[in-house]
Image (cartoon, grey):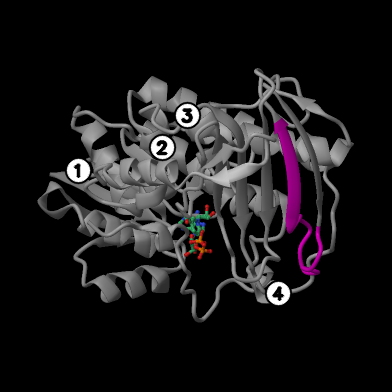
Amino acid sequence: MINCAIIGLGAISGAHVEGYLAQGASCRITAMSDVREENITRIIDKYKLEAAKYTNYKDMLADKTINLVSICTPPGTHKMIAIDCLRAGKHVLVEKPMAPSLAECDEMIDEAKKAGKILSVVSQYRYTGQYYRLKKLLDANKAGKMLHIAVDALFWRGQPYYYLDWRGRWETEGGGCTLNHAVHFIDQLIWHAGMPKRVAAFMTNAAHDNSEVEDISEAILQYENGMLGRITSSLIHHGERQGISIQTDKGSIGVPFIPQSSKTLENGFPQDDPEQAELLRSEFESIELPPHQGHAGQIHDVIAAIEGRKSHYVTGTDGRNALELIQAIYKSAATNSVVELPLPTNDPFYHKDTMIAQMPVYHEKKVSVEAFKNNTIKVGGSEFVEKK
Ligand SMILES: NC(=O)c1ccc[n+]([C@@H]2O[C@H](COP(=O)([O-])OP(=O)(O)OC[C@H]3O[C@@H](n4cnc5c(N)ncnc54)[C@H](O)[C@@H]3O)[C@@H](O)[C@H]2O)c1
């Protein structure tokens, strides 16, 4: 039985609670910490939990029976809390983005190695039906040779989104939609296609005037073999039509999964190839789903890794890779240049302070609240959970 604890009982914490509860007898939530006691009480009451309450997470870490800690606090606090947990001998599941800078990610990875503990970064889309099947289809070499990949990290947020004090500041949020929203899709892109070699990007703040950070960015990628890719990150897209689109020599696949194939006419113009599209569909639909989807899927994998069973848990290096591509997008957009990957440790975009010094401040943040009365959120990817 793995004893679990959660630090940060705000909007996303419910997904962790439900993820742990979904594991049945293999784990239980024994402790919770938040600087705001009312937030702990709200979650304990909502889920009828028997967990110890701590307003200082350091006191909680003294409890030697806790094995695994979920960190659900704002991004700027992730490194410090993760390192404290690892030093106290706990395994860590930290919410995305791993941290606002590569230097912080590297410190977290080093600490996990020293402690000999699991460090996993949340990327629940990897465990969500359609995204999971897409990866398996590509891995099985059933989808053909990849020719192009595009991700549409299209979200919509109203002005009040940036009232929350830690959001909309380079210092505490670390970035805008490219970091905090597109990170899910950037992880997907790297998972499917690997790291690109070059990035050219633009960004701006089109519609959120209580925020220093960007609310839209466009990035073009080039891979070592010449393949191109694209990432659109946005908080201004009504309807949030998110997804991935991959072109291969066999067809067009992605999420949402609507396979299409073309075959050539004598003059090179296309003709639909429904048989090939149907082959892709049947391969996709025959892929067995993971035992749990979303956060519960990731928690299941982390527990398997802790118990020494087979696991494909999302590692600290995975979280770092996503951040490195994000920093390359920021560097390209802020310096109007084409950026080569990997970013060296002496690059200004490796460290938070030197990165922030180069970033545009789109608007001064004037309105700030500590918390919303109603903090209900829609957890990303839930629309692509597949029924078994
Ligand atoms: N995976 C997803 O789909 C998803 C969705 C939303 C948010 N997130 C991520 O989850 C994290 C939290 O986001 P949120 O929307 O839940 O924020 P939130 O502001 O709603 O909640 C954060 C909580 O952390 C608490 N907190 C802050 N500092 C603390 C500290 N030092 N010790 C203990 N508690 C502390 C706050 O009081 C608050 O209750 C962020 O990294 C965010 O990017 C992930």
Looking at this view, is 329 or 266 the one in front? 266
Look at discs 1 and 3 and give the one toward the viewer. 3
The kind of residue tagged 2 is: Lys
Query: Among all residues in the image, which is located at the extreme bottom?
Result: 373
Q: Secondary structure at mark 4?
A: helix
* Relative to 319, residue 158 above or below: below
Dot placed on the residue nearer the N-terminal end, 4 or 2: 2
Q: Is residue 44 visible?
A: yes
Badge 1: residue crowd in 10 Å (few <14, some 14–19, many ≥20): few
| Image location (x, y in percent) of residue 238 | 65, 71
Which circle marks residue 159 in the picture? 4
Q: Which residue is mark 2?
A: 135
Dot placed on the residue nearer the N-terminal end, 1 or 4: 1
Would you say the residues marked 2 and 3 are in contact, meaning their CB atoms lie under 8 Å apart?
A: no
* Relative to 238, residue 171 above or below: above
The kind of residue tagged 3 is: Gly
Would you say the residues marked 4 and 3 are in contact, meaning their CB atoms lie under 8 Å apart?
A: no
Q: Secondary structure at mark 2?
A: helix
| Image location (x, y in percent) of residue 357 | 83, 41
Query: For this view, does 223 lie left or right of residue 67?
Result: right
Which residues lie in the magenta part? 205-221
The kind of residue tagged 1 is: Thr
Dot placed on the residue nearer the N-terminal end, 1 or 3: 1
| Image location (x, y in percent) of residue 21 | 21, 59
Q: Which residue is mark 3?
A: 144
Image quarter of residue 34: bottom left
Q: Is residue 207 magenta?
A: yes
Is most of the magenta stretch helix, strand or loop? loop
